[in-house]
Amino acid sequence: MNDVLRLILSLSLSGSILALILFAIKPFIKNRLSKSIQYYVWIVVVFRLILPFSLEESIMNRVFYNKSIQTQLPSKKEIQSISNESFNQNNFFETPNVKENVKTGVYNFDADHNRYFKDIFQRLSSHMFYIYLLGAIITLTINTIGYLRFLNHLKPKNKDATDEENLLLNSLINGKNKIHLLRNPLVSTPMLMGIFKPRIIIPDREYNEKQLKNILLHELIHLRRFDIMIKWVIMITKSIHWFNPMVYVIGKEINHICELSCDEAVIKNLSNKEKQEYGDTLISMVSEIQSSTGRLQATMGEDKNMLKDRLIAIMNYNKKSKIVIFTSGILLLAVIFGGLYLGSGVRKDNYNPTSKIEEETITTSIPIKPPSIIITNETDLEAIEVYTILKTKWNGSIYDRASFYQAAWSSEPSILTGLHRLVPEEEITVDFGDSKPDNVAVKMAYLTESYTESLLPIVDVSVNYHTNGIYKFKNPPASDSDIGTTGRVFCIEATWGDNICEYVFASDGKFDNNPAEVKWIPVKLDMEKLEELQKAIDDGGENSYLSTSLEFIDSIGHSSEDANRIKIEHNIDNKVIRYEFQGHNKFIELRLVQPIKKGIDGIWAVELYKLEQVSD
């Protein structure tokens, strides 16, 4: 299951649990605590449903990311299973190919079919996300279009209120808020609409002054408390959690407690007679309601079935004691803390499901198949892309195969083409990316005239781990043996748990024949001059510094006239240029850095050079 679905489900479960707790204690607080406090408590539930804030050790983190502390260490096989699950979670769009795994025998050692069913569930969960997303978009679209259609339905019939009604409204708001009062024959109950341009719409009928004052007081309370914004948040919450029936129950409860708390705010400073008049106004409004008015506006009239609760609350209202106020504050804080403790399934970047189990043994996930790697060396900008992978042991299967030396000769396609010429002692980097092995070992064999095994001893190469799945090792020194070699074969053995494979690649071995005469000599580069040269070329200027006119050869005591010039355009993909000197039985090779400008007259920088005697 991907992280997005985990987060949505954890929020939905967390908010639902909090709501069930409030429903359980509702009979004890319904008539004892302030309606406003009850309203704010339910708003906390809504925020719990949409905000992924969480304590580190929250319940949802433990449920959805298995962060509970282990009292007994699992076996190595169980650790590998957990790590495989973690690897699959990281790949949102990558799902296991169950049919292919069955064909290749991946599940042959899955005695309890645990991995088989997990792979099926993971494949289904990738489709579940798109089903969820489609449902959320449809729900949000339906609600938004319904609201816009309701607005368009009312707009043609809206008309300004009378001057007397506007004067009464202005006296109640003291000119502090800009709000428009409208009449409309299509509405059956007063309502507040709009967040940025609020307007009160009342039915187009006659009101006495007391009725109109009660209506306006009620709607102005909605305005001051930003209840319209809360209703939009509830609509978005329903769209996010469209699959959870509990969310619709929560929405209905909040709408009801919103009206109760608004009534309470209006009547708290009224006399008993004024309370009676306010109740009569409610009754007259409810009696006129003919149909549902939607949920994105604050209405004074409500469902007739809820009217009884509102009238009882009005008649039984009394100022709360300090103890009740204190208790209300404690409840609000308790619900906020409870929401944080329930939390959400928020995955941390450094989350590792096995770190608390066996930190030193398993630090990374175990890949389903040998991952691709990137091999680079210091003197080439291009990566060494030609390599082959040999499985030794994988998913319980042991492979009977040739040695890495034999594999180099028989590989299809051949890894002995397009070879890089690696300089002795230069650093080679292997990048495993996110699939860091538990262990890496490197060996090197010289390619000799034998096809079965090298005529020279295999060299164990020291390898060091750096960071982020990157390992580095140095190319061994040149061979001083009389046995001729044509290249080198490298074997990078990587281990993940019980799974072992080898990555095999080859390099040119010119350095291993007569190393005394083919020693590479470094050239001191003037980096400032190179930077100036680069700027000059970028601006269209010309410079002959280290060009192909063989000025470099002149500088080491040989005449360029005796050299057969080789055009750089024939060697764009190579980093070594060879010049043979006529009559001298020698040639010079120049190791070049990346060309600053390509072409026959391209300007290059020489990094190393060597002289070699031409054999007779």
Image (cartoon, grey):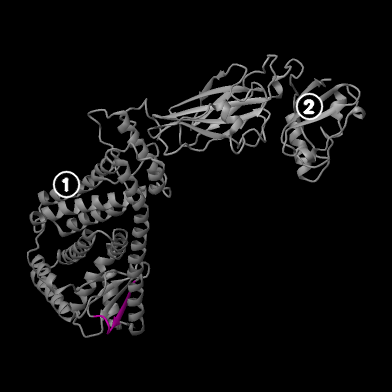
x, y percent for residue 121: 32, 49
Quadrant of the image occupied by residue 320 = bottom left
> Residue beneath label 1, please?
330
Magenta stretch holds residue 182: yes
> Residue beneath label 2, please?
589
Q: Which of the labelled discs sits on residue 167, or is there none? A: none
Residue kind at label 1, given as amino acid type: Ile
Q: Earlier in the sequence, mark 1 or mark 2?
A: 1
> Helix or strand or loop: what does disc 2 sit on?
strand
Q: Along the horizontal axis of the image, is 52 left or right of 260?
A: right
Is there CB contact under 8 Å for labels 1 and 2? no
**Numbered range of the magenta stretch:** 179-187
Which residue is at 82% across, 20% downward?
615
Q: Is residue 51 visible?
A: no
Quick check: 287 above or below 579? below
x, y percent for residue 574: 73, 35
Q: Along the horizontal axis of the image, is 388 left or right of 580?
A: left
Quick check: 40 above or below 616? below
x, y percent for residue 473: 57, 24
x, y percent for residue 17: 19, 51
* Marks 1/2: CA–CA distance: 83 Å
Which residue is at 13% across, 67% downward?
270
Give the number of callouts.
2
Quadrant of the image occupied by residue 357 = top left
Quadrant of the image occupied by residue 87 = top left
Q: Along the horizontal axis of the image, is 102 left or right of 451?
A: left
Residue kind at label 2, given as amino acid type: Glu
Q: Is residue 152 visible?
A: yes
| Front-lying residue, 312 or 27 | 27
Neighbor class of circle 2 (other Cα within 10 Å; few <14, some 14-19, many 20+) is some
Neighbor class of circle 1 (other Cα within 10 Å; few <14, some 14-19, many 20+) is few
Q: Nearer the viewer, mark 1 or mark 2?
A: 2
